């Protein structure tokens, strides 16, 4: 599933090529998504200028002169910039939003995403699925103190809690796994048992991991490409995601020096179990064993 970096890279790519242009129409080949796409999208959009695109969590809010598109890539969605005359649509190319000689082409094999239209009288932020979202990870409001308060009433394992999107948005399985490892926190730790000090490390790790992914163009596991058609390379450098069942290696987070400071921290990692898809931890509450980096 596209996560925050992939959605942000998509947003930036679309704005770079067609931001400020007037829409010349749309081609809707399929309307059946998680939310139905309007069959009359061309009529709704024609002549309107694309003023901006905002990302909220994994949602994109496209601002036009007289309304908004709200879109979500779902599990396998991709939006690419194409020359509509030179690039024939292929299977699962469901919608083209036309801007003269360029088009934003929405491709979604599983159709778990959506693209809807809202009139200017309706605030997209009031949609139930957007209104309930947690903090943006790069926002000043995303702090260890606020996260500690928010997690106080949940005993879910911290990874499960983060994946709900109620506490911070856009941190899916890949980036959650990597962030917890960098923060030296086991994914199985009950969320309400984490101290503010340990959550400070987690907040910093989430920002660090997401920043690195943005620099690497996101993560391409199967479907994702940027608006320019480029793959992402973050997972090539992933330390723990996708390593379940692999032979044992001693893997250290980049801030390993800090890992000796807090009781119960991860000191080194072993093979994951079941579907957690992150290397679990061997904890040592008193001292770091005399291990060397691989």
Image: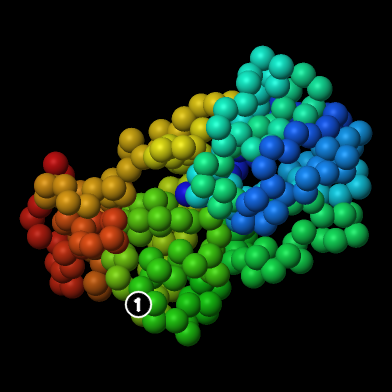
Could you say which is closer to the camera, residue 294 or residue 197? 294
Residue wearing tag 1: 190
Q: Quadrant of residue 286?
A: bottom left
Horizontal placement of 146 versus 272: left or right? right
Which quadrant holds the C terminus?
A: top left
The residue positioned farthest toward the bottom in the image shown? 153
Q: How many numbered circles are shown? A: 1
- Rendered residue at 79%/27% (across/down): 99
Q: Quadrant of residue 46?
A: top right
Mark 1 neighbour class, 10 Å CA radius: few under 14, some 14 to 19, many 20 or more: some
Where is residue 44? Give x, y as percent. Answer: 87, 43
SS category of the residue bearing label 1: loop
Where is residue 283? Give x, y as percent. Answer: 18, 67
* Above/below status of 48 relative to 291: above
The residue positioned farthest toward the top in the image shown? 86
- Rendered residue at 85%/61% (across/down): 122
- Rendered residue at 16%/56% (across/down): 270
* Above/below status of 146 relative to 226: below
* Above/below status of 174 relative to 92: below
Where is residue 38? Give x, y as percent. Answer: 77, 48
């Amino acid at each position: 599933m596209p996560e925050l970096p992939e959605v942000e890279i998509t947003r930036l790519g679309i704005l770079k090529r067609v931001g400020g242009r007037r829409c010349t129409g749309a081609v809707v080949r399929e309307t059946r998504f998680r939310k139905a796409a309007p069959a009359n999208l061309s009529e709704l959009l024609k002549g309107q200028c694309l003023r901006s695109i905002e990302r909220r969590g994994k949602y994109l809010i496209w601002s036009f002169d007289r309304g908004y598109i709200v879109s979500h890539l779902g599990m396998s969605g991709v939006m690419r910039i194409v020359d509509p005359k030179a690039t024939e649509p292929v299977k699962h190319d469901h919608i083209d939003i036309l801007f003269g000689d360029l088009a934003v082409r929405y491709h979604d094999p599983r159709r778990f995403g959506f693209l809807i239209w809202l009139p200017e009288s309706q605030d997209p932020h009031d949609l139930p699925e957007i209104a309930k979202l947690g903090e943006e990870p790069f926002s000043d409001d995303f702090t260890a103190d606020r996260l500690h308060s928010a997690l106080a009433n949940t005993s879910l394992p911290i990874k499960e809690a983060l994946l709900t999107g109620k506490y911070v948005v856009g941190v899916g399985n890949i980036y959650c796994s990597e962030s917890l490892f960098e923060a030296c926190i086991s994914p199985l730790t009950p969320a309400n048992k984490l101290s503010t000090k340990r959550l400070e490390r987690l907040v910093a790790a989430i920002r660090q991991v997401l920043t690195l992914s943005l620099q690497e163009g996101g993560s391409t596991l199967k479907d994702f490409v940027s608006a320019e058609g480029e793959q992402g390379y973050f997972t090539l450098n992933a330390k723990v995601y996708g390593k379940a069942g692999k032979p044992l290696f001693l893997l250290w987070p980049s801030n390993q020096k800090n890992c000796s400071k807090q009781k119960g921290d991860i000191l080194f990692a072993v093979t994951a179990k079941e579907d957690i898809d992150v290397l679990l931890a061997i904890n040592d509450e008193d001292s770091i064993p005399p291990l060397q980096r691989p």
